[in-house]
Image (spheres, rainbow, N blue to C red):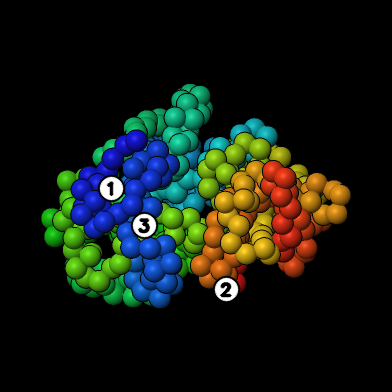
């Protein structure tokens, strides 16, 4: 497993480590329950260096990305970002990508893209296949940058104390649209500070070179941010209903099924997979939908498996993709795909995992606790 520049710091904080997307990262520091409460009520931080990172540049960069992904990326300027989905010719998902536009001149654009670490080789192969006459180059910079995400209602105020920019009249960072970013400094570290709203909690991604990882982490810790591990981060993701690569995002499903429709443009013109997605949307042909489940038999996480079948009566209607224990519900919750006619809030179903059967209720994400 890969280690990040913050490994020793996590060790000193008493972290219990696990394999997180191929990296050795904290599962938790104190206890999952305490970290869940902190995530809901305090300002928290988590290392997310595990994300894949690509730098793309050249005069056709934005046009190229617009033609190979689902969102409308036209008109983006430096300081703006967007989420978009890479789809194949059948409209199936290759990966979800976040792009940050660093430069956007007439003859040169530069973009930093964040994606799933497990998908990065597949995405690089896909890009190489599609770059033909385009003036686009890319480089895998995954190992060059650290990412620390901070979340909480007071996160912006805490960050502002130390974040410096050249603008004499800089606006409140809390007013930045989601995915937009500014570039500045925390002490000697040059930071890309990007607004996020993952898991329905406002926050920011801090992206910067590895050399400054320890100093920035310690500063954030001293400012009052509470470290949380990836065990709780996964619970928050499921509660928000956001899909990830290898579970909900695979080439078995399309972005409309995965509730990623807000990242799909039906008006920007042709892109890979556009014809299929447009036909599904215009003819109301969606076959299945990503939904949530509350398992009604209490603390049975170890017995409810990802990949378990979902039944309505004697009809198999779908499968679970992610399973975890929610400290808010005090029950096992899950995400999974079901046939569209069963994707109804409050629908009663049965989960069949190995030889066990569990009654469950469908929830249309996000979960409301």
Task: Tell me the SS state at disc 1.
Answer: strand
Q: Residues within 10 Å of mark 1 (few under 14, many from 20)?
A: many
**Placement of the C terminus among the 4 image quadrants:** bottom right
Q: Which residue position is annotated with label 3?
A: 28
Q: Gap in Å between the C-alphas at discs 3 and 2?
A: 22 Å
Report, in whole angstroms, how far the alpha carbon at label 1 lies from the one at label 3.
Answer: 19 Å
* Badge nearest the viewer, 1 or 3: 3
Figure quadrant of the N terminus = top left
Outermost residue to the right: 314
Q: Are marks 1 and 3 in contact (CB under 8 Å)?
A: no
Instruction: Give the percent coordinates (x, y) of residue 211.
Output: 17, 46
Q: Earlier in the sequence, mark 1 or mark 3?
A: 3
User: Mark 2 or mark 3, which is nearer the start of the sequence?
Assistant: 3
* Residue located at (22% from left, 65% from top): 221
Residue 317 rendering spot, x and y as whole percentages: 79, 49
Of residues 4 and 65, the one drawn nearer to the viewer in this rendering? 4
Which is closer to the viewer, label 3 or label 2?
A: 3
Residue 274 is labelled as none
Residue for badge 1? 146
Report x, y in % for residue 24: 33, 43
Tell me what residue is drawn at x 73 percent, y 66 percent: 345
Say if mark 2 contacts mark 1, CB within 8 Å: no
Callout 3: 10 Å neighbours few (<14), some, many (20+)? Answer: many
Using the image as rendered, state which of residue 69 and residue 248 is in the foreground.
248
Q: Is residue 6 left or right of residue 312?
A: left
Q: Earlier in the sequence, mark 2 or mark 1?
A: 1
Who's the residue at 40% across and 75% down the image? 41
> Outermost residue, front direction?
355
* Residue under label 2: 369
Q: Are marks 3 and 2 in contact (CB under 8 Å)?
A: no
């Amino acid at each position: 497993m890969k280690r990040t520049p913050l490994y020793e710091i996590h060790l000193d904080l008493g972290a219990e480590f696990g394999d997180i997307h191929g990296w050795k990262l904290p599962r938790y520091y104190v206890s999952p329950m305490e970290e869940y409460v902190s995530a809901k009520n305090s300002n928290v931080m988590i290392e997310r260096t595990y994300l894949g990172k690509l730098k793309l540049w050249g005069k056709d960069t934005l046009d190229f990305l617009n033609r190979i992904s689902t969102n409308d990326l036209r008109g983006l300027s430096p300081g703006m970002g967007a989420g978009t989905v890479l789809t194949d010719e059948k409209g199936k998902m290759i990966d979800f990508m976040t792009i940050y536009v660093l430069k956007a001149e007439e003859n040169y654009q530069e973009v930093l893209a964040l994606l799933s670490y497990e998908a990065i080789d597949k995405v690089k192969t896909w890009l190489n296949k599609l770059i033909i006459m385009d003036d686009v180059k890319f480089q895998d910079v995954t190992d060059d940058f650290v990412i620390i995400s901070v979340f909480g209602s007071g996160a912006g105020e805490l960050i502002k104390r130390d974040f410096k920019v050249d603008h004499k009249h800089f606006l409140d960072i809390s007013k930045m649209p989601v995915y937009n970013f500014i570039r500045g400094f925390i002490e000697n570290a040059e930071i890309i500070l990007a607004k996020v709203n993952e898991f329905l909690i406002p926050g920011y991604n801090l992206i910067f070179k590895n050399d400054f990882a320890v100093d920035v982490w310690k500063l954030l810790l001293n400012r009052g941010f509470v470290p949380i591990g990836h065990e709780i981060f996964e619970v928050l993701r499921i509660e928000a209903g956001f899909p990830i690569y290898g579970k909900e995002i695979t080439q078995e499903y399309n972005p409309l099924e995965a509730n990623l429709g807000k990242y799909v443009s039906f008006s920007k013109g042709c892109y890979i997979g556009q014809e299929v997605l447009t036909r599904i949307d215009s003819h109301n042909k969606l076959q299945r939908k990503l939904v949530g489940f509350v398992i009604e038999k209490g603390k049975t996480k170890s017995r409810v498996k990802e990949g378990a079948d979902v039944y309505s009566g004697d009809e198999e209607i779908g499968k679970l993709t992610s399973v975890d224990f929610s400290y808010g519900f005090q029950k096992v919750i899950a995400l999974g795909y079901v046939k569209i006619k069963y994707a109804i809030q409050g629908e009663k179903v049965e989960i069949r995992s190995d030889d066990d059967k569990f009654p469950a209720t469908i929830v249309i994400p996000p979960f409301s606790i």
